[in-house]
Image: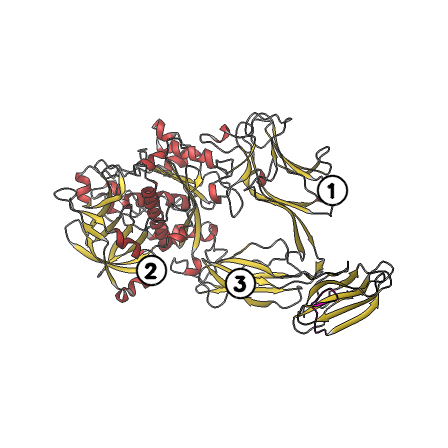
Amino acid sequence: MLSSVFLASISSAAQLAEWAVPLAPSPQPATAEIEAYRPVLDALGGLVGRDRVRLSGVPLADGGTVRVNLRSIRLDRLELGLRVDGQPAPDVLAGLDLSLWRGTVDGDPGSDVALSFSNHGVRGWVRAGGTLTHLLPVPAEGGDWSRSTTWILSEEELAEFGFESDFACHADDATQAAGRTPRNATEPARHGSPPLVPKDVSTSADSPCLLRTCSIALETDFEHNQLFGGSVPAQVAYTTSLLGAISDLYESELGVLLTFPYLQLYTTPADPWSTPETGFAVLDYLFEVKAAWEGAIPGGARLGHLLSGAFLDGGVAFIDVLCEESGAYPFGVTANHDGSTSFPVAVGPFNWDFTATSHEIGHSFGAHHTFAWQPIIDDCPSVCSSSGTLMSYCHLCPGGISNIQLAFHPLVREYLLDEIVHCLPLASGVVVEPPLAWDPSASTPIVARVGGTPVGPVELSWRFAPADPFQQLAMTDLGGGLWSADLPPAPCGTAPEFFVGYTDTGCGAASSPVFTPPVAHVEVVFEDDFETDKGWTGGLATDTASAGLWVRAAPVGSYAEAYEDHSKAGTLAWITEPHAGGEAFASDVDGGVTTLVSPLIDLSAGDAIVRYERWYHNIAAIAPGLDSFQVDITDDGGQSWVAVETVGPFGEQATGGWHPHQFLVSDFVAPTAQVQVRFVAKDSFDTTVEAGLDDFLVYRANCTVCQQDLGFQGPGDLSLNLCGDPLAPGGSADLVLAGADPGAPVWLVGSLVTNPIPIFGGTLVTVPNVLLIVGNADAAGNFELPGLTSTVAVPLTLYLQGLAVDLALPELIEISNALAAQYLP
């Protein structure tokens, strides 16, 4: 089934300018019978960023050409979290001139075209008129993919060169080996009506309000990299195109956008997977992935999948795991990513890997083979058919992969939608990270990530009390789905609320939860994201662990260790020894205790809140779930310690993942100049223990607001402060002019503008003045005006300054600093 977006793009194809396909005949054909083309490199960049295009001159295997109408598959929607050999590699895509397209042959609505263009290979297929043409890239001599050519072959020519479409799927074997009982294909829907979708709304993938997302962590192996002769750009171009095409299929067929927050490539044999080297079956590979990722799929993904270049007799996935909450079985493997090709094309047919990987992910979503249905949908390969679908075995029949329509059978599709609407989140909606506090004296910035397509404004709604009506403020579009606006200052003592909402073009009203941050001014005492060394101590002389000691490093990742730090920017965290490949227990905490201690934190000026993100895992190895993670605090530089929290041995937060925690220091010790916090990980029972710490913050939150000091103090020692609540109706703030001689005459002057002029040996800024208050300093040398509030109808800034007579030198007039007092309606 084609999505409404796709149909709309085709209906408007007549309006498109026509481009020549960026391929030119190669001076040297592939063989006497097979044509080869070289990419027109200068033209590739012109395709990037376009939504739709019509290309003429697309070559076919019979020697002819066709014109195709194409729509772009947006690669940014895949949210690729690319890593190479354990390190983040977000810039590899840059410079590839990569674009991916799906569409049809002009005048043939039943045709199917998929094309990927890049300067490291042009690939794809054209299925039209009962024939299938493959476009296969071939590197130049020496494995140079930047000078690749593209061969144009038919399915029959592939077979003549020895290509074998004998891919076998072992999903049923995996189910039996794991002792699982997934929902049978013949059983009715088990969930009833969808909880997030009204009953009268169609579950068609054409309904944009039903577009959902499913995140998949993708792992590869060294053998996959070697399909491209070790070229990371060529591997990235191919793999990104593959994933984009698969996501497009799932979106058009099932209304699901696939995202890939983790995609790992390996350029050396030191990948963490042993199955390809041992030559075991793909089923062994699946259980190796399960052992590594169970309970801790990288990137927080819902599913985990491995793409292998090794020949391991096919693919495999656990069936029906989309709604599973245990995290024990959401895994799959697609091997043979060379399509079993024995002729000199480095990588097999693009639609072969596309079909095989889509098939295995379909099992994860809950699909069974079509021969398992009653009545049977198709009985390939026992009874051959040329109209198989993605969950069929018809590729084993004469005709090979051309027997597979790149779609789910309607019965399979309906079956899968029952899972999807209950287990996957809607793509449209609002995600907001609330602030630590709502500032009482300044605006508080709010950034929201908006999914879907807004109609009209995205609005920030707020109120200062639950009984008040919400007020709306239009947010600013920052691009990339991000919107921003500023909350106005909130009065101290109130309980304000805010949320972000909008109307989606297909889904109607959408909004975030209502947030209720405390009203407070945040004063940061100490902050550390660990990108620089700020004096932490990892490992003490009294520690007893023999391995897995605390280090400040970029996490590498395993099923126990974090795959990345928590900070939005940067890569470093304190972790218990980075994973170095192989089994996770090879680098975890072993044989005792390892301790991380903060530098001294000076809290002599008052109490504070300590906040941090921590990682802890203890659920594997011989004795899982027995060890714990300890956080302590001291107020005497480490002479004595008081327990703050214990994580584990049981509970969700002992199974990995970054989790926030915060506490008030005075709840445990006195705020002194010698406060330290320590984090203790231990291995006492042969558990696979990994711990981490990131984004450590010490801050004060209070609602004492001091109006802005503009300077200009002197001569003399007078100081002027106006502190308390914001100057708003119902608030209360105290003005204090300090530093005068006891009993000295004082003046408080105010103006609505600043006009600094030299006077009395200093500078007076409050000229011309609209306010003049005369008085005398008290016995302490202070002049005070307590309980000031606001009665203004519109925001107003009043500039204030104090003067006093120096009684020892009556001819000397002392001048205080100036303030900018913000009065709020």
Residue at the spot of label 2: 51
In the picture, measured across the screen, residue 10 lies left or right of residue 748, that is: left
Instruction: State the quadrant of the C terminus.
Output: bottom right
Q: Nearer the viewer, residue 151 or 768?
A: 768
Q: Nearer the viewer, mark 2 or mark 3?
A: 2
Find the distance from the CA under tag 2 to the CA under tag 1: 61 Å
Q: Which callout, 2 or 3, points at the residue further toward the start of the chain?
A: 2
Q: Are marks 2 and 3 in contact (CB under 8 Å)?
A: no
CA distance for labels 2 and 3:
28 Å
Q: Are marks 3 and 1 in contact (CB under 8 Å)?
A: no
Q: Which residues are magenta?
A: 758-768
Q: Earlier in the sequence, mark 3 or mark 1?
A: 3
Q: Is residue 761 magenta?
A: yes
Residue 769 place in picture, x, y as percent: 72, 73
Query: Which residue position is annotated with label 3?
Result: 501
Which residue is outermost to the left?
32
Q: Nearer the viewer, mark 2 or mark 1?
A: 1
Q: Secondary structure at mark 2?
A: loop
Q: Which residue is mark 1?
A: 672
Element on which disc 3 rests = strand
